[in-house]
């Protein structure tokens, strides 16, 4: 019997000058564990006059996780951080009570052909930490736990705890974000190492569950993380994420996440009235979309 409860197909979304594939939130499943938002960026081939330019914009109540497969992004934030992220590394920014940041193609790539491909993820903060001080940390690819099983399947624990291992990324609740890659077909049985709610995103290749094969650009949400067992196809790469769900409902308004609708309204007014901190060495801000003005 299949353990798949919900099948979510990647949906196109416009984030300004860049199209992405949205996975979460979904009308039937707003969160998986503490994960509230996942966008698949690219793969996008950009020529010498095309660049990623997401200008300064605000967040509250969440941590952002950026993980690239190809390309590079320069992150700047109101804490004074300037950090380039490259494939396999992790940028983890915790907004807490409020932070502003931008994401752009690095200067040395702006006049060349390039490719951008990766995941942008939001993780909701526990209620008692929603108003914490903002912070940022960068973790190099070689500092993440990597291992192989007896079938030659490779694993990377990008964030959280699982398999008796712990990522150095400073998360704030019980969660996991795992990369699994295989050149050959192999049976995967990892339910005993997972907990809470669990989602599986197929980036490349296939997985087969109870005789049904699922291809790339699909997110599968498990009925029970403890029953996570499937066959991974040849030359496949998948991501498993989830963890303990937060006890309170989370609301989203634009780039803001909170357990309080009133706090979302305050954040909206703070952005409209320029009360968020500014990003050094940046100009201009992304205005609140008109759609949210009367929300």
Image (spheres, rainbow, N blue to C red):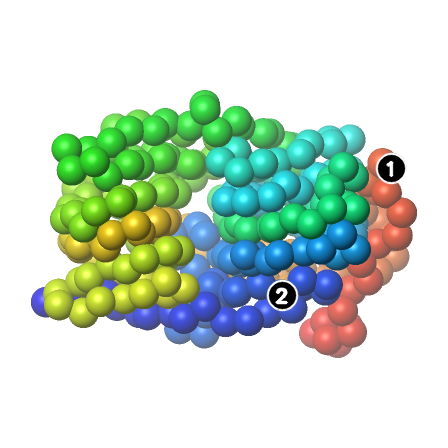
**Could you classify mark 2 by the number of other residues whose Cα lies within 10 Å: few (under 14), some (14-19), or many (20 or more)?**
some
Cα distance, mark 1 to mark 2?
Answer: 26 Å
Element marked by disc 1: loop
Return the x and y of residue 264 as percentages of the image width and height.
67, 59
Asked if residue 199 shows in the view, the reply is no
| Left-right relation of 207 to 39 | left
Nearer-N-terminus badge (1/2): 2
Mark 1 sits on what residue? 281
User: Residue 229 location, x and y as percent?
Assistant: 16, 52
- In which quadrant of the rendered image does the C terminus lie? bottom right
Question: Left or right: where does residue 127 sit relative to residue 266?
Answer: left
Return the residue at label 2: 19
Q: Quadrant of residue 154?
A: top left
Tell me: residue 10, above or below residue 200: below
At x 87%, y 57%, the residue is: 273
Query: Which of the 4 image quarters holds residue 177?
Result: top left
Marking on residue 53: none
Residue at (71, 55) in percent of width and height:
47
User: Which residue lies at the image location 24% right of the left edge and 59% below the top edge?
Assistant: 207
Residue pushed farthest left?
1
Please say whether residue 255 is visible from this viewpoint. yes
Residue sitting at x 45%, y 24%: 142
Quadrant of the image containing the N terminus = bottom left
Q: Nearer the viewer, residue 170 or 68?
A: 68
Q: Which residue is at the front of the view, 170 or 41?
A: 41
- 232 above or below 152? below
Binning the other alpha carbons within 10 Å of mark 1 as few (below 14), some (14 to 19) or many (20 upward) gives: few
Circle 2 sits in a helix, a strand or a loop, which is it? strand
Report the side of 247 relative to 277 (left or right).
left
């Amino acid at each position: 019997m299949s353990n798949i409860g919900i099948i979510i197909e990647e949906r196109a979304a416009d984030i300004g000058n860049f199209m992405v594939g949205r996975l979460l939130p979904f009308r039937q499943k707003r969160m998986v564990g503490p994960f509230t938002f996942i966008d698949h960026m690219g793969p996008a081939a950009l020529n010498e006059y095309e660049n990623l330019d997401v200008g300064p914009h605000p967040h509250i109540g969440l941590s952002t996780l950026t993980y690239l497969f190809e390309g590079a992004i320069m992150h700047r934030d109101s804490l004074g951080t300037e950090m380039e992220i490259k494939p396999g590394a992790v940028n983890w920014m915790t907004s807490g009570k409020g932070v502003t940041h931008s994401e752009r193609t690095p200067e040395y790539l702006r006049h060349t052909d390039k490719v951008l491909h990766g995941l942008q993820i939001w993780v909701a903060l526990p209620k008692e930490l929603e108003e914490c001080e903002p912070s940022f940390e960068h973790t190099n690819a070689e500092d993440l736990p990597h291992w192989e099983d007896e079938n030659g399947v490779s694993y990377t624990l990008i964030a959280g705890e699982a398999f008796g291992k712990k990522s150095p990324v400073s998360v704030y609740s019980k969660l996991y974000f795992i990369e699994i890659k295989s050149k050959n077909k192999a049976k995967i049985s990892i339910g005993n190492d997972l907990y809470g709610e669990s989602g599986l995103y197929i980036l490349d290749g296939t997985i087969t569950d109870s005789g049904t094969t699922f291809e790339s650009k699909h997110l599968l949400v498990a009925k029970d993380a403890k029953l996570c067992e499937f066959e991974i196809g040849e030359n496949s790469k998948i991501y498993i994420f989830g963890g303990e769900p937060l006890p309170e409902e989370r609301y989203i308004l634009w780039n803001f996440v909170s357990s309080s609708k009133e706090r979302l309204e305050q954040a909206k007014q703070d952005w409209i009235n320029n009360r968020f901190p500014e990003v050094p060495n940046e100009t201009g801000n992304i205005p609140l979309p008109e759609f949210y003005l009367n929300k």
